Amino acid sequence: MSDPVHGMKSPVWRAATAVGALALLITGAVTSAQTTGGYTAAQANSGATVYASRCAVCHGTSLQGGAGPTLVGAAFKKSINASYKTGADLLDFISKQMPADAPGTLSAQQYADVTAFVISKNGYPANSTTFSAANAGDLKLAGVTTSAAAMAAEPKVEIVRAAAPITKQFGPIPGGANVSVTDAMISRGWSSPADWLVNGRTWDNDRYSPLSQISTSNVRSLQLVAIAQTGFTASFETTPIVVGGVMYASTPVVNNQMKVVAMNAATGARIWETTYTLTPFKICCGPVNRGVTVAYGNVYFLTLDDRLVALDARTGALKWRVQVADPSVGYSETMTPQVYDGMILIGSAGGEWAIRGFDAAYNAHTGKQIWRWNATDPSTYSGDSWKSGGGMNWTTPALDPKLGLLIFSTGNPNPDLYGDKRKGDNRWSDSIVALDVHTGKMKWYYQEVKHDVWDYDAVSPVVLFDVHKNGRTIPAAGEAGKVGWFFIVDRRTGKLITRSQNYVAMSRNMFSQPTKTGVKMLPGANGGAEWSPPAFSPQTHDVYVLAMDQLMNFQTEPAVNTPGQLRLGSAFTNVAPGGLQDGRLVAINVDTGKVDWTHMTKQPLIGGALATAGGLVFYGEGDGTFAAVNARTGQVIWHYGLGAGVNAPPVSYSVGGKQYIAVAAGGNFQLGYPLGDTIAIFTLK
């Protein structure tokens, strides 16, 4: 066994990064001669209560950091000196972007109090002045003297080694189960519908099950037969993988740990579980992991601290793990990897940091990197801004073995809303990209939004299908953009075939430049479709997209590049109450680009869809509703309440000739939906 590690967007989903603004503090002791502002001790005590309930989950109970950066220490002095010179600068930013799951929702007093609390922990003395928006500009933060006493309280930087994963065995793999998945097994997805072998069920990412035992005529008899609890309650976005009656799934990260579990896919009975401990990491959008992939006798998964890990599929024992990027500068990994021809194919997350996105291939047996493609084109960024220009790949790529193409979508350029320092098209960001799967060489790209300053990135997975147009059959690729259109391109060339009708509300000023004072726009920074994977049905030739309308106020400000710190240059907050906030399940015909039907929901939708040969589409809602609709009409036929938000993509499979539907119910960090820790399994009575 080798261990190379030892050798080495809330109502506003992007707002999860904004709690990092609190980290932009200087350690110091300030005398009254240095500042005329301040805060009271009682106010700091009140702020401690607010901090404990709304901030500590990311930054730690002692401000030591965790999912979010540490909030004490001299490491952030440069940022304060550059951008947050006074209490007013800091309070303004925090008030617009905190708390992570609902920015802008605290009272003015709470924002003032929690800012006072963090300031107090950084050596600034209390006095008789109450800190408020009216006098926050009087409190100087930059350029102050640092005292030895304050420095003594700074968290000590330690070299952290990754702890060995811990595996528990509960029972054997079911007799006869072949969990050594091969490429041939994956390629036979249509003829072998019992399993769900890769994230999108097939390399096409279509999330379509050929099983038809559960249908429009009998789905009302669908019943819950098992609830598998993981014990890790947090934003739950996993897609279970099912191989020979064995289900594999990953959990979110809780207290710097996550689990990979193997269980009986019919009963939920645990077979084994492996607990993985993470080293320090930085995240923008919740402590999520979107799933594992199973191949060649192994279970592969990525971690928020930028490791690619291989476990034995039969026992859960560690095979190997390798570092794929540097978490200290803002890289993280949320996606389910893709697998093909002895390679594990991955992409990078972390678009709110001043880093350059990438995709890469690794040897599935050794973990050795085969190729890496960088996601920013230097010729389309001014100066050297391409070096930190974003273009992340958040979700699992599609794959066309016949053409030898790896096809995926890319995220926003960095910084999000401030484009003055990255003038140009910022090519390969906000795009559908195709690479040679064996070499990583660029084959083609289609850019959905040039020079994005609205966070209209492409984060939903690419889906492959055929388009029938003018008597021709065209191999196509489609992506549900956050901008609110479904883009369909010829997957041989990248040439646009169709841009669909808009599937969400769009304001006339949706491409207006954000300003310092703010501009209200639709569809908002969560866009039409977030990371939610759509499903495609060959029966209807419709793609089914989970979408949302969120009227947002976009404000911009200059962005400073400080290594290891987030760089937004922006603030975008929900206009609520009174602003448009709802969800849509939309059927879009891929031949015409027209919206066939729309099913409206009260809450914004995030999670993913499943289409089946039984004429059904399954999806979940933030209030815990799990539902099935008629794929041709959008009429809800069946629903079930699971308590926690159903914000993960459902899957379907069969065991012993019986069809099952399974979905994770654990809520969502980005939209603040109720959290949980369960995988629910359904079948017919």
Image (spheres, helix red, strand yellow):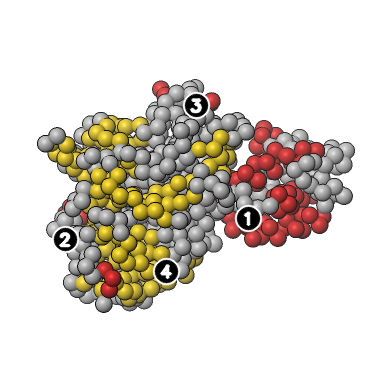
Query: Which callout, 1 or 2, points at the residue further toward the start of the chain?
Result: 1
Residue where numbered disc 4 is placed: 642
Q: CA distance from mark 1 to mark 2?
A: 48 Å
Q: Which x, y percent locates residue 258?
A: 46, 62
Residue 595 quadrant: top left
Say what secondary structure mark 1 lies in: loop
Residue where numbered disc 3 is placed: 422
Say what secondary structure mark 2 lies in: loop
Q: Are marks 3 and 2 in contact (CB under 8 Å)?
A: no
Q: What kind of residue is marked 1?
A: Cys
Task: Give above or below for 124 relative to 379.
Answer: below
The residue located at (71%, 49%) in the rendering is: 108
The residue located at (25%, 30%) in the rendering is: 495
Q: CA distance from mark 3 to mark 2?
A: 48 Å
Q: CA distance from mark 2 to mark 4?
A: 30 Å
Residue where numbered disc 2 is placed: 192
Residue 673 seen in render = yes
Q: Are marks 1 and 2 in contact (CB under 8 Å)?
A: no
Residue where numbered disc 1 is placed: 55
Q: Which x, y percent locates residue 546?
A: 37, 51
